[in-house]
Image (cartoon, grey):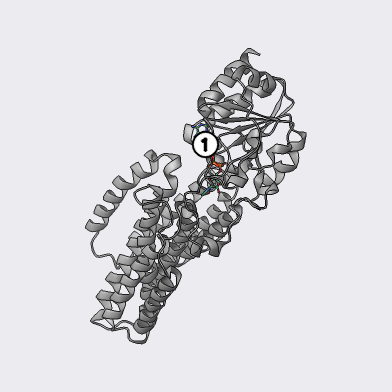
């Protein structure tokens, strides 16, 4: 009877996961999506605790206590800008759990003889799990700057990595053919862990978010394999959902960064960018503007678009951006926020920050929809964005950014850029927008500049 109840709860949890993923696709329903996912996870955990194979709850309670103590600060106190490395660490923990379960189950069954199919599932789980643990730790190290962000390359890296991966796959095959081959199982786990390190080291810090998302996908597949090995349906479903969505996200991010997926994985790209090539140095003078003049323009503008970028996240200026938008609207202007898919340092970064500041969702306009609107816009305010508004992506075939879809702010009637100085963006290349005759630069920290603008707009 209890088994029927468990399976029914699992079915409900799986449905909640699917609905959650669907809701997460849109900013206005993302919060609901997170709640649905949390409810699904709670139901799945409770149902699993009813499993009759559990003989004692003591260690489970200890595990829940330690996990909660570690997880709460990670979730609540890590700043948004450090989210990619936090997520990398979570994947490492998740994959470690899958790997340890796989090793535990295999060793436990060894004396009684492991069934071939089960050995295959456990082997797959441990191989992918070990690779994900070390790969995620490398990604964490790079993003946290504990390891050098530049690609650490070595001769014949792709050949060596492929050879090691093939050797690991051969060990897996061996375990499937002879499920008592404990040495092959151990060798496979070690090789998987080594491949994880060697595959991530040659990838630059710049591409780490794509890698983290891919490792998320691997962790999901490892969990699905655990589900097969342990005959647990919810692990199979949740793992498969995780595996598929992680892969889709990785591909979407590569696309938005104008990189082919294989190039991210095998190209040793993403190095901290070199200073721009001399040919790319923009020609022209920067026109500084003070807050008073900029505010006057904004106060009397009909259509205004705010373009948030990484600098807004760094200075945590989302509330000030919303206040400024509200004030401009009080003066009769119409304000929208243009969202580039890779603005900031993680997918949805700007959506999350602006939603936190209470910007209505209908004011957040995606790149494809907002681009045709720039030509009709009086003033664009670029708040700490750089690469995502760099016209070289459209106009300069020699630029490393050429072809990347960008926000066409240069089409607007006038542009005000808020940034601290002449710092380059993530791609490390100069931006002609800043010397465009219709662009004015308001130098300073984004939050302070927005506060000054708000004060002046209020007084206008
Ligand atoms: P960029 O990194 O291109 O530029 C940010 C700009 O903000 C800098 O030029 C900097 O100039 C300015 N800035 C920094 N701190 C402040 C501050 N406190 N106040 C005001 N300005 C500040 O950001 P974008 O959002 O335009 O582009 C994102 C980049 O990140 C893209 O290249 C994208 O490919 C990449 N990326 C994005 C990922 C994602 O998932 N979103 C993942 C991985 C990479 P200054 O120093 O002069 O102030």
Judge whether residue 453 can be spotted in this image.
Answer: yes
Q: Position of residue 163 (x, y in %)?
A: 41, 76
Q: Nearer the viewer, residue 25 or 388?
A: 388
Give the residue at the far right of this rendering.
376
Q: Residue at x 30, y 76 (%)?
A: 187
Q: Position of residue 310 (x, y in %)?
A: 52, 39
Horizontal side, residue 379 vs residue 55: left or right? right
Look at the numbered disc 1 and say if its residue's Cβ is closer than 8 Å to ligand 1.
yes
Q: Residue at x 39, y 43 (%)?
A: 75
Q: Nearer the viewer, residue 261 or 368?
A: 261
Q: Quadrant of residue 263?
A: bottom right
Horizontal side, residue 135 vs residue 111: left or right? right
Give the residue at the far top of this rendering.
459
Task: Identify the image quadrant of the C terminus.
Answer: top right
Judge whether residue 46 can be spotted in this image.
Answer: no
Q: Position of residue 336 (x, y in %)?
A: 67, 34
Q: Nearer the viewer, residue 173 or 179?
A: 173
Q: Position of residue 51 (x, y in %)?
A: 33, 65
* Residue on which disc 1 sits: 423
């Amino acid at each position: 009877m209890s088994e029927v109840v468990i399976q029914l709860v699992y079915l409900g949890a799986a449905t909640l996961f699917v609905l959650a993923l669907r809701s997460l696709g849109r900013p206005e329903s993302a919060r609901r999506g997170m709640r649905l996912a949390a409810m699904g996870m709670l139901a799945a955990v409770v149902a699993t605790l009813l499993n009759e194979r559990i003989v004692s709850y003591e260690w489970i309670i200890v595990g829940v206590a330690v996990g909660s103590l570690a997880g709460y600060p990670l979730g609540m106190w890590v700043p948004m800008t450090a989210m990619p490395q936090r997520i990398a660490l979570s994947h490492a923990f998740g994959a470690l759990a899958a790997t340890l379960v796989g090793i535990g189950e295999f060793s436990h069954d060894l004396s009684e003889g492991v069934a071939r199919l089960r050995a295959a599932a456990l082997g797959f789980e441990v191989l992918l799990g070990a690779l994900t643990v070390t790969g995620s730790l490398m990604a964490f190290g790079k993003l946290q700057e504990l390891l050098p962000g530049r690609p650490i390359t070595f001769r014949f890296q792709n050949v060596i990595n492929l050879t090691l991966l093939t050797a690991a796959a051969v060990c897996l095959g061996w375990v499937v053919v002879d499920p008592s081959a404990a040495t092959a199982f151990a060798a496979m786990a070690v090789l998987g862990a080594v491949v994880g390190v060697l595959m991530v080291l040659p990838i630059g810090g710049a591409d780490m978010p794509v890698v983290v998302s891919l490792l998320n996908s691997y962790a999901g597949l490892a969990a699905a394999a655990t589900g097969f090995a342990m005959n647990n349906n919810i692990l199979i479903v949740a793992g498969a959902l995780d595996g598929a969505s992680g892969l889709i996200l990785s591909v979407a991010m590569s696309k938005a960064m104008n990189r082919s997926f294989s190039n991210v994985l095998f190209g040793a790209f993403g190095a901290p960018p070199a200073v721009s090539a001399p040919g790319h140095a923009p020609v022209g003078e920067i026109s500084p503007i003070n807050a008073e003049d900029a505010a006057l323009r904004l106060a009397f503008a009909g259509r205004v678009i705010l373009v948030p970028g990484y600098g807004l996240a760094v200075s945590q200026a989302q509330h000030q951006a919303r206040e400024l938008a509200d004030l401009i609207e009080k003066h009769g202007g119409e304000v929208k926020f243009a969202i580039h898919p890779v603005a900031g340092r993680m997918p949805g970064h700007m959506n999350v920050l602006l939603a936190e500041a209470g910007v209505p969702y209908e004011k957040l306009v995606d790149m494809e929809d907002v681009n045709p609107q720039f030509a009709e816009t009086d003033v664009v305010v670029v708040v700490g964005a750089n690469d995502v508004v760099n016209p070289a992506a459209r106009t300069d075939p020699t630029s490393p950014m050429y072809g990347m879809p960008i926000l066409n702010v240069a089409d607007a009637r006038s542009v005000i850029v808020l940034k601290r100085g002449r710092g380059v963006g993530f791609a490390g290349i100069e931006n002609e927008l800043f010397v465009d005759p219709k662009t004015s630069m308001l130098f300073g920290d984004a939050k302070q500049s927005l506060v000054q603008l708000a004060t002046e707009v209020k007084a206008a």
